[in-house]
Image (cartoon, helix red, strand yellow):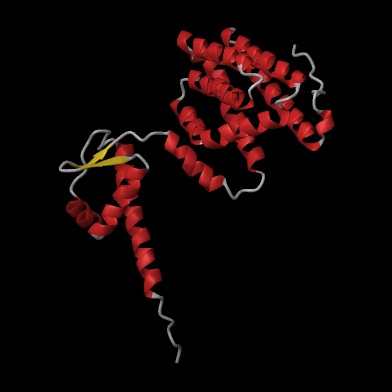
Amino acid sequence: MTTRTQQPLITRVAEAEGSGFSKVFAFLRDRLLEGSIQSGDRLIPERELAAQLGVSRPIVREALRALSMMGVVEIRERVGTVVRKPDVSVLGDFFAFSMAQQADIVDDVMQARIAIEVQAARLACRHATTSDLERIAAAVDHIEATVNDSEEGSRADYEFHSALVRASRSETLLQLYAAMSTLLLRSHHERRDVVGGDPAIKQYLVEDHARIFQALIARDEDRADQVLRKHFSIGDEYRRKAAADPAARGRPPERKELA
């Protein structure tokens, strides 16, 4: 006779809660996607939502609290749960947590960044407005003004690339980039720490960002693509050499003149 092993109660409860959470999340996600609820709308009461989804009210309540922390809903006293447009910056922390244990995270994030920014640069050549270009120009000036300040300079660098993505006028690319913001800011800071004391790299930083900007002004997609890819390639090569051999600092990699 085979003895059936009973599943521990705590595991069954955890699985039930997980399933309940998933139902609440899926309910809200699907209705947002189909457009039946929008930012500013009030959700049905917890009791009705629990009955509709076949879960307990405590699970609904906890799921709504989690969604509130994510900025997806707002729980208002005497009003109920109201849908809101999430603050995309919150995604940066979630993304950082999910990637924190991954090996070679810097290289992996850089590859994703290149994919986003190169496409954004092409789109910016088509869609950038005057205000977009003015914002990028201000970022170039900020990079030059803070080139001797590792902390502020890394933020200025991030502002430039963020402005470039914004100029693409692609909401999806902007959201993806914003989700990476925490890791990108850290990456910019670490790279500046490695090469920040080199006069050669300081000049390179200013001139190369200006070259990217000029390609955007010219609305030259191929040129913007080429200059941006070279920018990432040279910057990464310099960072690797400087990190591996401190004596190599001040001797930037050879840069072939772009046609």
Tell me, yes or no, if residue 136 can be seen here: yes
Q: Position of residue 211 (x, y in %)?
A: 66, 12
Residue drawn at (77%, 19%) of the image:
200
- Image quarter of the C terminus: top right
On the image, which quarter does residue 35 sit in?
top left
* On screen, residue 90 above or below 134: below
Front residue (pair 186, 36): 186
Q: How many marks?
A: 0
Image quadrant holding the N terminus, namely bottom left
Residue under the point 37% across and 70% down: 12
In-image side of 80 versus 155 (left or right): left
Residue 33 image point, x, y percent: 33, 38
Instruction: Reply above or below: 125 against 63.
Output: above
Residue 221 visible? The answer is: no
51 lies left or right of 167: left
**Left or right position of 65 against 124:** left
Would you place residue 192 above or below residue 215 in this image? below
Q: Position of residue 22 (x, y in %)?
A: 36, 54
- The residue lying at 82 percent from left, 21 percent from top is 254
| Figure check: 177 above or below 19 | above
Tell me which residue sits at (31%, 38%) in the image. Answer: 32
Q: Residue furthest right?
A: 247
| Image quarter of residue 62 | bottom left
**Residue that sits furthest to the left in the current view:** 78
Residue reaching furthest to the bottom:
1
